[in-house]
Amino acid sequence: MKKKLLLIALLLSCCISDFAQRPNMDSLQKAYNKNRQDTTLAKIYFYKSMYVFLTTNVDSGLIYSRKALDLSRKIHYEWGEVNALTGIANYQNLNGDLPGSLKTTFEVLPKALRLGLMRTVAACYNTRGLTYSTMHESQKALDNYYAALHILEKQHYNDLEVTLLNNIARAYLDFDRTDSAYYFTKKAYDFALEKKSLRNFGYLIRNFGIVEFKKGHNEAAIGYYRKAINDSTSKNDHYLFSECYRRIAEAYQKMHQADSCIYYAKTAVDHAKLDRNPDQVQRATTLLTNEYKAVNDYKNAFYYQEITQQAKDSLFSQQKTLQFQNLVFNEKQRQQEAQAKEIAYQNKIRFYTLLGVLVVFVLIAAILLFANSQRKKANSTLKQQNDQIEAQRKDLEKTIADLKNTQRQLIQSEKMASLGELTAGIAHEIQNPLNFVNNFSEVNTELIEEMELELDKGGISEVRSLTSDIKANQQKISQHGKRADFIVKGMLQHSRASTGEKQLTNINVLADEFFKLSFHGLRAKDKSFNAEMVTHFDPDLPKVNVVQQDIGRVLLNLINNAFYAVNQKAKTAGADYKPTVELSTSHTADQIEIKVKDNGNGIPESIKGKIMQPFFTTKPTGEGTGLGLSLSYDIVVKGHGGKINIESKEGEGSEFIIDLPIA
Amino acid sequence: MKILVVDDEADVQPLFLQRFRREIREHEFEFDFALSGEDALNYLHDKHSEVVLILSDINMPGMSGLELLSRIRHEYDEPPPMVMMITAYGDEENHRQAMERGANDFLTKPLDFSLLKEKLKTLSI
């Protein structure tokens, strides 16, 4: 039984034999003798297995493949291991151990792929295709052949192609797809011719014959079969011969040439017997039995029917075994597939679980990274903002310091500005007393000269009169000198920073002086300027304790404003308008009141609330600092505990009323 | 010759009287005084025919000397009194305006009384 299977396997071997590169065994052996390397030895085992025993001794072939495997595993020689396994799969297939072969190919394929041994991968697919073919699973066989072919074409392993193309063609013949079978047979044939690889020639030509036969071209088919027999390189290929002669007989049967049919069928039986192939025997004898029956030769018909029966018996058990093996194998395969599915499912679950976990991790990492970068960004933004705030704070501090400085300068410049306005008035006011001083001095000199003359003459009464004049003049000189002195002192006081020292002051004198100063100052600046100056001084006005230069500044300011207001109105009003500024003082029991009144344009309602604000001015740029009233307010209200009230009617004029507490 | 002196400074009066005391004693000049432009106009209203010469300060509160000059030139043209303007600010603008308005002369403070005397004497001849 096993022997018969072996035979079938041997027949198939020709389809495999090319699937390893043909090495030079002698040179390998020499190399090993020299270097004694285990890898070389493993190679020798493998090549011996594949080339020495493939067609001669399946058992020895298997043994050598196993030796190659054991040695390779021992020395961790992966190339050797993978190739040895491929060899084992091949022999398992030949031995009819189809499940073992399949299992081996499943085991070796991933390793071969991993190592990039594409020739071995192709060999595995081919072996698997052969296994499926034996199991009559032609589609699976074809799938595997194509997988192998794809690799071969890609890697240009041209030497393997003939074998594989033949295998494919045979699979198509099983399907009755003659066109495809013809195509692949022709391709293999041409390739074999080109490469002068003639070992499979007989089988290829047989394929052509079968194709013609299936098309109903019996004579053409017969021609091919004969050619296959003649062109076969091996003269002992009884399988091929038996098949071809039987197929010739079948063709003659179709052509109703009974003699020829019987003749060739008998030859087929002879070769089938030589091949010990019961399948071939029963196919040929069945043909003979039918033919003898047709010609009523029952003796021969009976004789061949007997042989058919014997062959069938043996074939039956053989087929039974095959079927049984198929069943076992299918079950195993089913189990393996189920297992593989289970593993694949578990792997899938594991994969997706891992993927899920990974995605979650990546997400978490991304979120963390994002949060981190956001935080970094936020931190850097915060730092930037802090820096900005710090810089702004410094700027502000500097600005405040600058502002304070500017304020000081402004107050000073306000003083200087009002002083400037005063200067011309001061010049005039000093010039006048000085003129008097000078003039009265000169007059006195003259009077004294006259007096001397009169003394010489003895005119005593004249002398007395002159003396009293001189005396009066002397008083004038003194008076005007003091007046100049007061003005200069006032000016100096005004320009100096306030000492804050309060002293009892006659407001009437102060007010009158600044009234004049202001008037002359404005006159000096604007020759066309004029205004009526009216004073109503309270002759009983008590002295008040004030900072003179401060209150003087307030008065000067208010008076200047009043003159400015009437002057502005004078520019637009008609000739009837009499610009007038009134300055009056009065007192009650606990306070004195100073009023500065003008008949100018008045203060518009819209700006009444603003005029005490610093820097508010209605004067053109450069003419006023806008600090006058604000400083006045500070001086009166904050400095002296007084009040400033404003009464104003648009178009009629304004009145500023200052109340200062007595003592 | 009657001279009206217009000045807001009251002390101008004793000064003039003393400076010109010899001329006054010998009745060469006679002085009257006004402390403002308005005063001067009031005075002239009554005695314009007596006054030959008006000496007026320019810078005064109320009516200025220039205004006074204009009024005099406007109201008293027959016979036109002589008007001399006096100012502490001897600047071109005041001078030009005074001359435009018909001033006969322009003097600056401090007054040079010798010069004034000479001018008055040439006038009186």
Image (cartoon, helix red, strand yellow):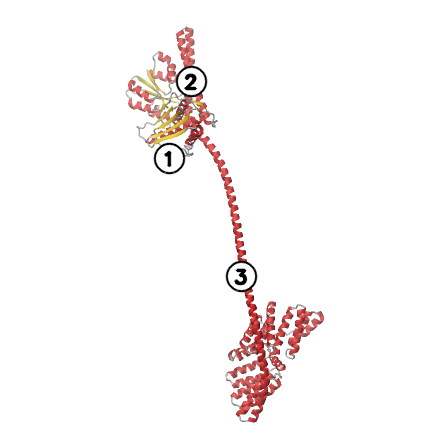
- Which quadrant of the figure contains the C terminus of chain A? top left
Residue A479: assigned label: 2
Report the chain holding disc 1.
Answer: A
| Residue A274 horizontal/vertical position (percent) | 62, 86
| Residue A310 horizontal/vertical position (percent) | 59, 87
Report the chain holding disc 3.
Answer: A
Residue at the disc numbered 3: A356
| CA gap, disc 3 and disc 1 | 76 Å
| CA gap, disc 2 and disc 3 | 111 Å
Give whichever of discs 3 and 1 has the lower sequence position.
3
Residue at the disc numbered 1: A607
Using the image, determine if residue A503 lies above or below residue A298: above
Give whichever of discs 2 and 3 has the lower sequence position.
3
Using the image, determine if residue A508 lies above or below residue A451: below
| CA gap, disc 1 and disc 2 | 45 Å
Categorize mark 1 by other alpha carbons within 10 Å: few (<14), some (14-19), many (20+): few
- Please, what secondary structure does the residue beneath circle 1 have? helix
The one of A46 and A63 positioned closer to us in this rendering: A63
Report the chain holding disc 2.
Answer: A
Residues under numbered marks 2 and 3 in contact, where contact means CB atoms less than 8 Å apart: no
User: Which amino acid type is shown beneath numbered disc 2?
Assistant: Gln
In the drawing, does residue A161 fall left or right of residue A583? Answer: right
Say if labels 2 and 3 share a chain.
Answer: yes
